[in-house]
Amino acid sequence: MRLLVVELRRLVARKVVWLTLLGAVAVSLVSVAGIFSQARQIDAARAGGDSDYQRMVEESEFQQEECLRMQDQDRRQSGDASIDYGCADWQVPTIEEFYGQLPSLAEQLGYALQGMAYPVMFLALAMGSTAVAAEFAHRTMGTWLTFVPRRTPVFVSKLLAPALAALPMTLVGLAVVWLGVTLVYRIFELDTALGADGWSSTLWMAVRIAVLAMVAGAFGAAAAFLVRHTGVVLGLMIGYLVLVEGMIGSMFGWVPRYGLARNIGAWVQDGTSWSTYTDCQRMEGCREVTQTLSLTHGAVVIGVVLVVVTVAAWFRFRTADVD
């Protein structure tokens, strides 16, 4: 326990922790700013102060008038009163159709929190890998082992420290999103009621994202024990997303069920579903198949990946030389 406290103090003293915290806040503010911009556009359009929407309405009305004029002219010239160009069916898009409609506060918070999952995961991963890789790059790991000549406790402390440090970073980012979205709804006098179900679903989603960030921090540290370089860790993750999740996953329909992307989505969203298409024929089209993953399935896959990488990292740290 004392070793973990010391490791946390050393980690907090590094710039990477504060940079990831600033990154989480920045991502949160960008998310809130996007929702604010959409709400302001809808509010301005309703008040008649949005030039783009007003121009579109005027053009639509002008085109409808032209349609009616041509219809009347052709009726007179042909003597056929049954000519109908469908001008009466001309519909001017509503403000909601033009800009989209803001969902309820509970739904908006759910979307915003889901959007925060991958950024905080990446930040936690970067923090964990940087913290460990820096020890090898600056040759302080060997010095640290002279003070604590037990590799397993050192390994455990260096995995737990980034995981715990990722928690406040994630909670701050999620709190900024929560408070920011609620403030936007209050500013534009939208319904801010969440209800019991809304509170429960959003709170549990925030908890799951926080746990996911802690897992990412530990995973980043474990991966750094394996490859000993932050750039290699991030490069391998990007390569995995492009090659496995992107290319191989699109060729073999069973891959996404065991890949990280879909299972992370299942964990964050309390289950997820998506559509695949099979038995494609040129004329008949394709048969749609709905794939589903439960929260439990997502937790098991994520847990297995973490355990495998952690065990491999521990084995290498226990047996490899440390400068």
Image (spheres, helix red, strand yellow):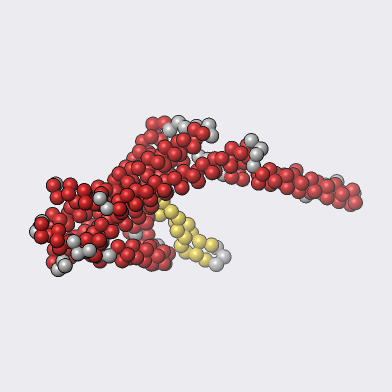
In front: 202, or 259?
A: 202
In this rendering, position of residue 233 left or right of residue 51: left
Asked if residue 79 is positioned above or below residue 321 in the image, the reply reads above
Asked if residue 168 is positioned above or below residue 285 in the image, the reply reads above
Image point 73% across, 44% down: which residue?
58
In front: 171, or 237?
A: 171
Whether residue 267 is visible: no
Q: Quadrant of the C terminus?
A: bottom left
The quadrant in which residue 262 appears is bottom left
Estimate the x, y position of residue 213 in percent, counting from the top left.
Answer: 31, 50
In front: 261, or 41?
A: 41
In front: 281, or 183?
A: 183
Estimate the x, y position of residue 198 in percent, counting from the top left.
Answer: 41, 35
Whether residue 179 is visible: yes
Image point 29% across, 45% down: which residue?
167
Asked if residue 156 is positioned above or below residue 36 in the image, the reply reads below
Image point 16% across, 66% down: which residue?
322
The quadrant in which residue 314 appears is bottom left
Estimate the x, y position of residue 119 in percent, counting from the top left.
Answer: 38, 52
